[in-house]
Image: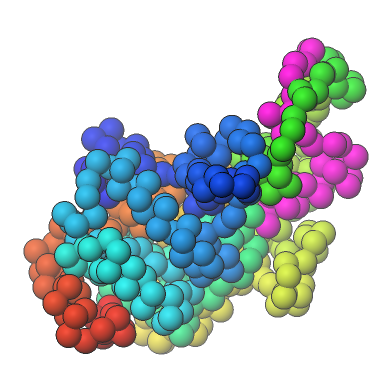
Amino acid sequence: KWTKAGFSGEDTPKAVFSSSVGRSTEMNNDKTFVGDMQLHYKQSNMEITPTISEGDICNFDNLELLWNYAFDRLGVSSSQYPFLLAEPISYSAATREKLVELLFEKKEVPALYFANNAVLSAFAAGRGTALIVDISNEFTTVTPVYDGFALKNAAIKQPIAGKFLSEEVRHLLENERGLNILPQYEIASKQTVSLNHPANFSLRTVNSVTNTFREYSRLKVFDDFKECVCQVTEVAFNKNDLAMRPPKYYEFPDGFNSQFVVERFRIPEILFDPQNFSTIIPAGWSKDSVFGLHDLIHRAILQSDVEARPHLYSNIILTGGSSLIPGISERLSYEMARLVPMTKVKIHTAPTLYERKYSSWLGGSILASVGTFQQLWMTKGEYAEHGASFIAKKC
């Protein structure tokens, strides 16, 4: 079991928390808020800022706070253990060098190593060659891994992922259904009402709440709706057929409740047909520059070496929190069979939800336990001799 790196003996996460950080905006108050419990409850004049944006680290001060919180939760000192960082392909050289400086200078780690997320997910699945389809919060990334190395030139990413789907949920509820979604903390009390009847509730008096905290809390509602209601249809989207499916019931924080049928399939359909089903466009992108999940996979494989392609088609591994939407693996199998009918295609998913969501962490525990891996660490002595740029040669 991976105890120090994030998993307890019960195979459940021990220290998994939001990467956002809250800071007080009051004069002479430098209090910070880290962890889901602190961010969940209303704090006076708390601004919430992200640590990662557009696939790269945008706030290193936040990152230090997150590390401090993680080490504290795990009950260890950063100077006691080597540091293995699971990194996406999107980290720039400047970001990697900055991370090295912070870890050696401020955290005083004895050694470190940076491993690609996709490679670690492949190790977690027991494969040296695989196509890792990581549907995370900000991006969907498809990365070919061949003989333990990520083929970065063939990797493809796009912003049709969890956060984008949550924004589509916002559009559905507010623009199409005309609902005013209130965060939980604004509701003082509510009464039970019949299906689709107006909510009967009383508001709590709330002062000194920032816009960032309110939006953070509202996004939690959209995320919860997506996770509880949305489902991917196993075959091609057909509105008339889906209208015959059983509805899903959902109650909002203010007590309003309704049933959703076609809408719950329409939102995640964006993963497979963003051109026809998305109502918003990601900043900096156009509908012509985004593709369905099966098309991304096909494009990434075609950009890989010819000899690797059969192995990649037969070892497609789904990872990431947004890959947990029900029906997604069955639909992907259906679409791939239509796209490459004469090719052996196999979709692999981890047997448990935790393993799929945290596969790169599990892969990191496997990699770090291999005896031959110990010689790959970048040591503090090497940092002192060669500087932070030496990380490019080590990993």
Rendered location of residue 179, percent (x, y): 86, 36
The image quarter containing residue 386 is: bottom left
Residue farthest to the top, as pictured: 191
Residue drawn where x is 55% and y is 40% of the image: 39
Location of the C terminus (image quadrant): bottom left
Residue 226 horizontal/vertical position (percent): 66, 42
Q: How is the image coloured?
A: rainbow
User: In the picture shown, does residue 137 fall above or below 209?
Assistant: below
Q: Residue at x 14, y 77 (%)?
A: 381
| Relative horizontal placement of residue 52, taking residue 392 as reference (left or right) | right
- Measured as percent of width and height from the top left, residue 355 is found at 37, 47
Residue 100 x/y as whole percent = 31, 73
Task: Answer whether residue 261 is visible to the viewer in this image.
Answer: yes
Quadrant holding the N terminus: top left
Going 44% across and 59% down the picture, which residue do you hit? 63
Specify whether 71 is left or right of 24. Answer: left
Q: Indicate whether 203 appears above or below 350.
A: above
Q: Which residues are magenta?
A: 164-192
Left or right: residue 115 versus residue 184 is left
Q: Is residue 176 magenta?
A: yes
